[in-house]
Image (cartoon, grey):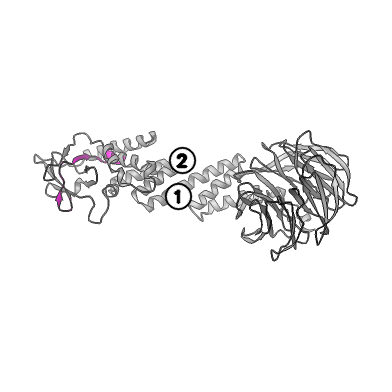
Amino acid sequence: MSQHFAKLVCAWGVLCVFGCAQQKVEESAKPFEITLQSGDAPVAGVPVKIIDEPSAVRAIVTLALREDAKNSLPTALDNIFFEDLNPGSGTDVGKTDRNGKVAINRLRAQHFVIARDGQHLWAAPASAARDRKLQLARVDSSGRHALDLLAAQPVVLSALTDAALDLIRHEKPDQARAIARFVGSDTLLTRIDREEGVVLLFEARHAADQKKYDVARQLAARADTLVPNQPETKEFLRKIVVEYGGELRTLAGHKGMVTSVAYSPDSKYVLSGGEDRTLKLWDAASGKEVRTFAGHRGSVTSVAFSPDGRFALSGSSDSTLRLWEVASGRELHATEGLGWKITCVAFSPDGKFVASAADDNQIKLWQLPKVEPVRNFAGHGWRVTSVAFSPDGNLSLSASDDDSVKLWDVAKGQEVRSFRNGLAEVACVAFSPDGRFGLSGGKDKAVKLWNLGNGREIQRFDGHTQPVRGVAFTGDGRFAVSASDDGTIKVWDPNTGKELRTFTGHTAAVTGVAMSPDGHNFATASADGTVKVWQLPRQVWPPIEQVKK
């Protein structure tokens, strides 16, 4: 029992004793006779305790907060409860004789009579005495257990309610609910929810003031779950998401790690691939799974939409590429096993070609619709981890574990320029919408902005604490987004290198990120088995003039 709790009960006890001292108490030279029975049979040799209200409250609270009494009260705990009872000053403790009777010299109105025989518990308020006699039974006339009967007494219930609410104020809602469940009070549980909702909303506002927007949203969402449809909470949640961005929904359905994610060109759908060897198509607005694409014999490592949204492409650890019809989920074409794990796939802007990166240190160009090989891009000295097409389709950008980023002429298959990443493996690359700049992320935990025209590093974004696994530009190129093994997604201003927002919510590494073409949202894949859809902060949205274009 906490110190706060002890103070509360003691203070309550002092008030109770003071109040009771003003009342007329009934004491007589003749003792009260108490009879203990099970059915019609007397129960002999059983200890009986006379306790006051504070003692009852202390023992009940101690019992309710036990881990093994969290959701219900096991009868086995009756003995623990009885042993914890400390008879009040001036009260008697006795034992029943062979006829189940015990004489009590003093019994005041605020007292309770408790007995325990090793198997069962008896309880009754002194007010139930008639003609100086009190019969104790294991259950009352309605069949309630002795402890339920005791906890239902108005003065005890009131003190237990105060104790539960005090625990809420000291941020111990689970313990408060344990007491409420113990007394079986739905009214108290509802009140606890309301009290905790107030505390959570206060903490959410404080978190927002400290720019911990995801924490603020999570706290407010919890408050909204506890007490639905509170205007103040709803307005706070709306403001947090609209102004500062945040998680809109979680797409759950993959079994195991989700490795890749892509947005459809019309922003209506999200495509994901995972270790469960499947691709899944999701409705971005509702979060509902539309269909599953099955056929790979290994983990799906990368997915992409065609520019017209009609087709999907996937690469896998089974060393194949597969082309799918999005509307039906039907597999259209598949390559033979290439002998190497495919790490990344991409569509050309005109939809006529696809590129793949693999563990064989090469990028391969394929022609559609039959996924026929065109040429290889050779030059990396180690596994190629990522590949992307420039907006005009003339160039390709690749990343490798050989600590380099390379720019390629697609038509010739020749290397145009190489960018060294300082002996750190590179995991991901992306083109800016105007094709002039490139983003990369890798094992050095940094995101880097490159001038593709001269090969110079323009900006370095530091802030992640683990390797970066995914990078992307917003649709208008004004901002950059990165995803990391540290479980976070960050939004950056490329001009200043300033971190604008950090999103948290995934419980494991974030393995990929994809921007929605409308510039308002993005999707992430994670090792926690989920895909999440997020809203970008309002300041990142494209200008209205850009949207109209």
Q: Position of residue 497 (x, y in %)?
A: 75, 38
Q: Which mark is residue 445?
A: none
Picture disc at residue 171: 2
Q: Where is 535 relative to 290, above or below?
A: above
Q: Which residue is mark 1?
A: 194
Furthest residue to the bottom?
328
Q: Position of residue 259 (x, y in %)?
A: 67, 49
- Disc 1 residue type? Arg
Chain part drawn in magenta:
38-57
The answer to which of 31 and 45 lies nearer the viewer is 45
Whether residue 96 can be seen here: yes
Crowding at dot 1, Cα within 10 Å, few <14 / some 14-19 / many 20+, comes out as some
Q: Residue furthest right?
A: 412
Tell me residue 383's x, y (percent): 77, 42
Question: In this view of the protein, can residue 474 be seen by the observer?
Answer: no
Q: Quadrant of residue 450?
A: top right
Quarter of the image that includes the N terminus? top left
Q: Residue at x 14, y 51 (%)?
A: 41
Q: CA distance from mark 1 to mark 2?
A: 13 Å
Q: Which of the 4 image quarters holds residue 252?
A: bottom right
